[in-house]
Amino acid sequence: MKKRVIIPAAAGAFTAFALGEMYRYIFCRNPGLIGLFRGKKGHKSDYYAHRDGEADKLRKRACLRMELRNDRGNRLQGYYYCCSAAPCGRVAFIVHGYRSEHAETAGMYYDCYVSRGFDIFTCDLTAAGESEGRVIGYDVYESRDVLLWLDELVRRFGSDIRIILHGFSMGGATVLKLSDRCPKQVRFIVSDSGFTSAADILRERLGPAYRVFSAISRAVAGYGLNDTDVRRNLAKADRPVLFVHGAEDRTVPLKMGQELFELCPAEKDCLFVPGARHVESMHVDPEGYSEKLDSFIAKYID
């Protein structure tokens, strides 16, 4: 009789533990036990050397550190790098991706933007880097926080500043989620490797368990995975958008970038780079990437 009770109880406890660990791995800053044993090497060694070298350089550069508190009570950190002695009024706002932080992303684009006369602002999103927070928002939290940062930039540097909003992966989805509600200072958006929704990504990877984790997210974090869908916002976009995607992207499939490009009703262009994996387009084709950026800068800022 005892075995009949103990075995189902043990099985239930194990299932609850496994679900909890899987939730932490997918949604939380601390990826738990799964994060300790699951490696994540989606790029070749030359990409990591480039990214990490530029990140180290950026961390050593002088910057104006900024801070704000979001509507969830988290203290967030921002970093403003001037291209000259003082703020110049032209700002590239770099938004990093899932399980990344500001320097890993902005470092690779520092020379690109500074050489074109842009200051760089970047931040650690919620539950990343030096910012507070336990749970990742997959663009739900992040888009709200980026709006707060945009308001702060306007407050500090004036209503006549001109901003490029440039996001990568989850950051690419984040900036698209703002494509219908940016302040007027945002002149155009660049979405590099942005997804249609976290639901589309995780539904394929989790299979039948997808509904369970979406329900857990709704209960724990206050959002369901369908809330991460950027298509409803993009369908009403009122800013020009440059879509960039690697043709060999195994994390966010190229078909997502193509779908988003087709959906966008605003002025737009695209760069789909052969041979590039996830967020590798600038690394693989810096000339082509720079050419597209220069075209948008000339048209929408200069």
Image (spheres, grey):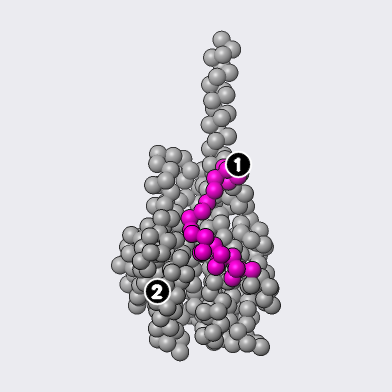
Residue found at x 56% / y 76%: 110
In the figure, 282 relative to 161: above or below? Answer: above
Please, which residue is most extreme toward the front here?
A: 46
Disc 1 element: helix
- Image quadrant for the C terminus? bottom left
Residue found at x 37% / y 57%: 253
Foreground residue, 15 or 35?
35
Please, which residue is most extreme toward the top here?
A: 1
Foreground residue, 131 or 31?
31
- Our reading of the magenta stretch's main secondary structure is helix
What label sits on residue 279 in the rendered view? none
Amino acid type, label 1: Leu
Residue found at x 30% / y 67%: 262
The x, y position of residue 44, in whole percent, is 49, 59
Q: Earlier in the sequence, mark 1 or mark 2?
A: 1
Left or right: 189 in relation to 220: left
Span colored in magenta: 34-56
The x, y position of residue 286, in whole percent, is 45, 75
Disc 2 element: strand
Left or right: 186 in relation to 75: left
- Image quadrant for the N terminus? top right
Can residue 250 be seen? Answer: yes
Residue found at x 58% / y 46%: 35
Can residue 227 be seen? Answer: no
What label sits on residue 242 in the rendered view? 2
Amino acid type, label 2: Leu
Foreground residue, 294 or 29?
294
Q: Which residue has dot 1 on it?
A: 33
The x, y position of residue 113, in whole percent, is 53, 80
Q: CA distance from mark 1 to mark 2?
A: 38 Å
Which picture quadrant has residue 250?
bottom left
Query: Tags 1 and 2 in contact by the CB under 8 Å rule?
Result: no
